Amino acid sequence: MTHIAEAAGFGSIRRFNAVMNEVYGCPPTALRKGSVHGAVGLELEITVRRPFAWDALLSSLEASATPGVEKVAEGRYHRTARFKRAVGEVCVSFDEAGSVLRVRVSHSLSSYLLDVVSGVRRLFDVEADVAVIKEHLAGDPLLAPCLRTAPGLRVLGAFDHFETAVMTLLGQHVGAEELAELGKRITEKYGQAIDTSLDGLTHVFPTPYALSTAHLEAVGVPKRRSKSIQALAKAVHEGVLRLDGSPSLDEALCGLRAIPGVGTTTADYIAMRVYREPDAFPANDRRLRTVASLNGGALAAHELEALAERWRPWRAYAAMCLWETARCNGTASSTYFQGNRDTITPPAPEQVA
């Protein structure tokens, strides 16, 4: 810590100690020992347009949270975050009276506040023009009930592009509980453990490099899905696939579909959340096809595609409305794409050769 004080330009250790106490609320020795490593201390505000369906968005996030990385507790969204070598935690709450998102950020992420704000804005779709979207969709009898009960519903984005893409790919052909269990195993084995201020928030999600060489079958991921995630991670790590929105949507979808195991519907779902495409629509999603049928059965994908033509250019928001309807009816618990799945319980790690 003395070397740090000298490198930072402090003329005396006494002054250094005083500043550290003022900024971090503890002496340098306590900070060095990591006793406040996960402390969340900086607070920001992000203004959002009214109406804002905070409760519905929070319920969707809770249902699809990656264990150890994300947690919904007491009406707040908590998560860990990594930017280069800096790790820490972020907490987001909604102040309805002020119509703002309150974002608390670890001091350890203070150099990356703009990145944190960008991630929160993407995740909660802050830029959505809800009035225009409602005007276009509210006349549809299939969507109108949801727009009345959850006004201001947004399309969930991605705080961490890679994490969301991996969890989407992992979520194919498994149920919500299996997805959570596999996500937990992957994070604990290949992610980085950190100290935080909240029980259950324990790791940052693995990096693309870590998963590009990971033997995911060892933690129960089916072999084909493991190879798909490895290929995705390798493409992202090597820069072949960009998830930050820099390529055109067509280029991005081509890159995604080139990965073994990534079909059209999965690519469309990633386009919704990661690439923020407002007209993306995963028409083969079973829940969408079931809710849209109105008779308890399920439309064929091409039938839903034809039906969804009237929702352009806001089909992603129509999909969120249908998923929210399914959630409220107790027929769905997650907004992660699960496709035409047969529930597969992942084997315990020790059962995998």
Image (cartoon, rainbow, N blue to C red):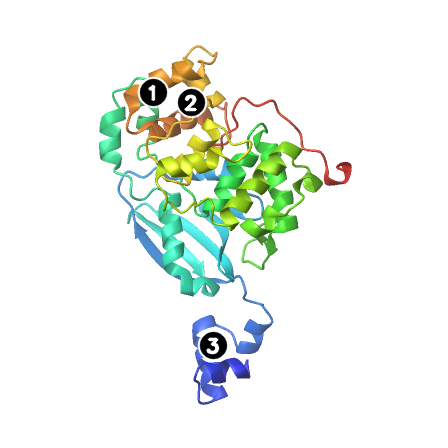
On the image, the x and y values in percent for residue 198 come to 55, 54
Q: Sequence-wise, which precedes: disc 3 or disc 1? A: 3
- Circles 2 and 3: CB distance less than 8 Å? no
Q: Is residue 11 left or right of residue 223?
A: left
Label 2 and label 3: CA atoms lie apart by 55 Å
Q: Which mark is residue 49?
A: none
According to the picture, the residue beneath numbered tag 2 turns out to be: 283
Direction bottom: furthest residue: 11
Residue 177: quadrant of the picture: top right
According to the picture, the residue beneath numbered tag 1 turns out to be: 308
The 10 Å Cα crowd at callout 2, few under 14, some 14 to 19, many 20 or more, is many
Q: Nearer the viewer, mark 3 or mark 1?
A: 1
Tell me the kind of residue under disc 2. Ala
Q: Residue at x 45, y 24 (%)?
A: 326
On the image, the x and y values in percent for residue 124 come to 37, 43
The 10 Å Cα crowd at callout 3, few under 14, some 14 to 19, many 20 or more, is some
Q: Is residue 348 above or below residue 321?
A: below
Q: Quadrant of the N terminus?
A: bottom right
Label 1 and label 2: CA atoms lie apart by 8 Å
Tell me the kind of residue under disc 1. Ala
Residue 34 in view here: yes
Q: Which mark is residue 21?
A: 3
On the image, the x and y values in percent for residue 306 come to 35, 16
Label 3 and label 1: CA atoms lie apart by 58 Å
